Every structure is written in structure tokens, then in C-alpha cells.
Image: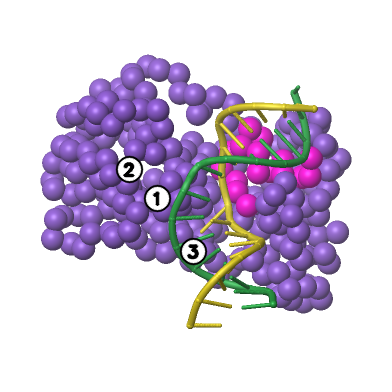
Chain colours: A purple, B green, C yellow
Amino acid sequence: MPELPEVETIVQGLRHCILAKQIISVQVRHKKPLGNLHEQEFKNFFRREIVQNIERWGKYIHFSFTSGKSMIVHLRMTGKFVYRSNSGSPQPAAHIRIIFTFNDKSALYFQDMRLFATFSLYPPHHTIREKQNLGPDPFARQITAPWFIDVVKNRKIALKSALLDQHVISGLGNIYVCEILHKAGIDPRLTAYKITRGQAQKIINSMRKVLKLALKYNGTTIRDFNGVDNKSGRFQQLLRVYQRAGKLCKTCGQASIQKIKQAQRSTFFCPHCQS
DNA sequence: CTTAACGCCTGAAGGC
DNA sequence: TGCCTTCAGGCGTTAA
């Protein structure tokens, strides 16, 4: 589900709600998100820990604790965190998998309908596997047109698939890649290594514009995404191609949005604007 | 090094 | 209405 704007919205919400709080109990209602970890070692990990910092790494959420330990969460498709300030307020209902309770009686509910999300735990000063091989953040200054051309120089896959590859740039997902390519006016089927310098620059500019706007709107809610406050994003109002197959392009008004499959994922594009 | 395909899960939406 | 099929914003693993 969540891509960069949604994960960033969640991280900011989490910082607002749980920073500097001490965990007093952890309830595990489903073991799947723990992967290979045993329930007891998972629970013991958080004993007396205080949340020191929360950061986004691509689509990963990195929690660090005052002891130096860290936890990495990937929400995948349907994972979400919902905060509840005290025991009086209503409890989130369905698909609650893990509950963290804090010293002020507030609680963080982890929900995940499809059980794809993953939690991993690291001792202090440990190399974090998830961070290895993750491409730069879309807003990193390292990303320039020549840099992008170099990164995809041996990639014979479609440009759209290359942008979804987290080793290239981290944080983009299907919705935003479709929207970015439409804004850039580039055909998603273009072979990645054939991109010109001008096209690379257009992609970079469009990527930053689209993501900034989506961040301002607290992300996109199609079906699953909600912030930590359980409120929806609003960027879905501004989508120009995603899930608009058969509808007239809002930009040119001349062609209808096409839907195709690329690497088993849906791609939406305007054949007039993106040729 | 690269690419394509599969599997993990549940629920909603669409077709007939 | 109901049943069956397809689809969903992701990514790690595997095989070629």
C-alpha cells in the first residue's frame, strides 16, 4: 500500500504521538509479521525501551530506542499504525496484529489485513540489512540526470519497472511512478537505458513535484491507506492517470487513459501526452 | 551482473 | 441475488 508520501505521513504522525515514550507492554495477536522471531524474544526486545527517533528509509520505517536498538518495519500492502491516546477512546477494530502500550496509557495498534508487512529487530550498532542496496531518496542531491542515466545504463527493462526498483531510487511505488511519468510526458514502455538526458531531467523534476504535492495532501487513499490519526490522504483527488482507465485525460482532453500490464503490475498512461 | 515469474494473504470489485 | 474470477499501492526468493 504505502509509498513515500504515505510512509512519510505515517512517520510524522508517529513522531508526533510516541516520541520519548516508554513501552510498557507488547501484545502479539498474530506471529506472521515477526517472521522468524519467536514471540517471546520479540516482546522481550522492547522491555523498558524508550522511543528515541523514527525515520523513513525508502518505504521502510526505522524506529530507534535509547538503548541503541532498532526496529525496521515495512508496511507492504495493507500494514498501518493507528494511535489511540488513552483507554477511553475507541479501539481500532479489524486485523489488529500487534499492540504497543506506552507509559502514559496510550497505545499504538498495528493493523495488517493481508499479513505481508514485516518487522525486524536489531541490536545496537548493527548493520541494518534493509538499508543495504537501497537507492537514494528522491529528494537526495545525489540524484541528477547523468547519475540516473548511469544507474540504468545496463537495464533493458521498461522505464516504469526501473523506477519501481528500490535499488534505483527508494520510495516510489506503482501509483506515483504512473503519475510521475505522466507529468514528465514519457512513455512508461520506453526501455530504461534508452532514456535521454532531457528525459531523465524531466523525470527527476516531475518526481519531486508529484511527491511534494502528495506529501502536502498527506498521501493517497485508494482503499487501504490511513494516517496514524486514522484519517485518509487526499491526493487521490489529484491523480491524473492512476485508476482512470478509459477516462479522458485531464491534461490533453484528447485521449483516454490506457491500462497495460508491465512486470505483472498495472500501468496507466495517456497515449497522447506520453508518446 | 541481468530478467521474469512466483508466492505470500485477505477482501473487494467485476463479470456472468 | 450468487458464484466465480480477477485484482490490489510490494518485494524477497528462485531460476535461467
Give percent across and percent down for residue A275.
Answer: 86, 59
| Magenta span | A157-174
Residue at image location 71% in from the left, 69% down from the top: A245
Front one among A226 and A209: A226
In the picture shown, does residue A217 fall above or below A42?
Answer: below
Q: Is residue A107 left or right of residue B6?
A: left
- Secondary structure found at label 2: loop
- Secondary structure found at label 3: loop
Give percent across and percent down for residue A172.
Answer: 60, 46
- Chief secondary structure of the magenta portion: loop
Q: Is residue A25 left or right of residue A245?
A: left
Q: Which residue is mark 2?
A: A30
Q: Which residue is mark 3?
A: A223
Q: Quadrant of residue A228?
A: bottom left
- Secondary structure found at label 1: strand
Residue type (three-letter) at the residue carrying disc 1: Asp
Q: Is residue A22 left or right of residue A135?
A: left
